[in-house]
Image (cartoon, rainbow, N blue to C red):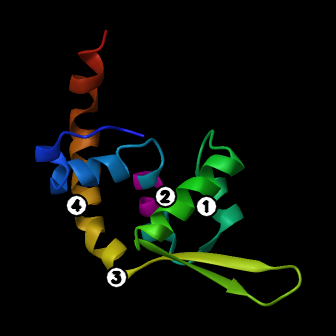
């Protein structure tokens, strides 16, 4: 558990970075935005090098944050689908803006690490 100084505990930017600063969350949201309602295996096919456990954990966290919905259908075999919520959809213009910035400045940022 992280200890957060009291003055930062209610900081919206810090809370957002804590939620989306991981390796996979924004990519999953991007995939759902482009693909619409998708099953677990469809999301996993679009991602490189993510384990089933990490994908499952990240999807659960995004659902807890009310950015995606998880719909389970009473079928055999079970069918589970994921989709963006309205809150998740409202985040997408910002993620797409960040994506455009990253593409435009990739060489500048990546070049600074060498």
Which residue position holds label 1?
Answer: 43
Q: State the extent of the magenta-drawn residues as a range.
A: 26-30
Q: CA distance from mark 2 to mark 3?
A: 16 Å
- The residue lying toward the viewer, choosing from 87 and 105, is 87
First in sequence, mark 2 or 4: give its number: 2
Q: Residues within 10 Å of mark 3 (few under 14, many from 20)?
A: few
Say the numbered circle drawn on residue 94.
4
Which residue position holds label 2?
Answer: 28
Secondary element type, mark 1: helix
Q: Quadrant of residue 71?
A: bottom right
Which residue position holds label 3?
Answer: 86
Q: Are marks 2 and 1 in contact (CB under 8 Å)?
A: yes
Residue 71 sits inside the magenta stretch = no
Question: In screen coordinates, is 110 left or right of 84?
Answer: left
Q: CA distance from mark 1 to mark 4?
A: 21 Å
Residue 81, image x and y in percent?
Answer: 63, 77
- The residue lying toward the viewer, choosing from 5 and 63, is 5
Between disc 4 and disc 3, the foreground one is 3
Question: In screen coordinates, is 61 left or right of 53?
Answer: left
Secondary element type, mark 2: helix
First in sequence, mark 1 or 4: give its number: 1
Q: CA distance from mark 1 to mark 3?
A: 19 Å
Q: CA distance from mark 2 to mark 4?
A: 14 Å
């Amino acid at each position: 558990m992280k200890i957060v100084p009291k003055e930062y505990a209610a900081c919206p930017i810090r809370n957002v970075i804590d939620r989306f600063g991981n390796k996979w969350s924004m990519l999953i949201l991007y995939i759902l935005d482009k693909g619409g309602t998708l099953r677990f295996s469809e999301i996993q096919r679009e991602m490189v090098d993510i384990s089933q456990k990490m994908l499952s954990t990240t999807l659960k966290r995004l659902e807890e944050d009310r950015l995606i919905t998880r719909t389970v259908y009473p079928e055999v075999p079970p069918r589970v689908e994921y989709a963006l919520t309205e809150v998740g959809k409202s985040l997408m213009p910002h993620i797409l803006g960040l994506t455009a910035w990253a593409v435009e400045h990739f060489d500048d940022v990546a070049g600074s690490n060498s």
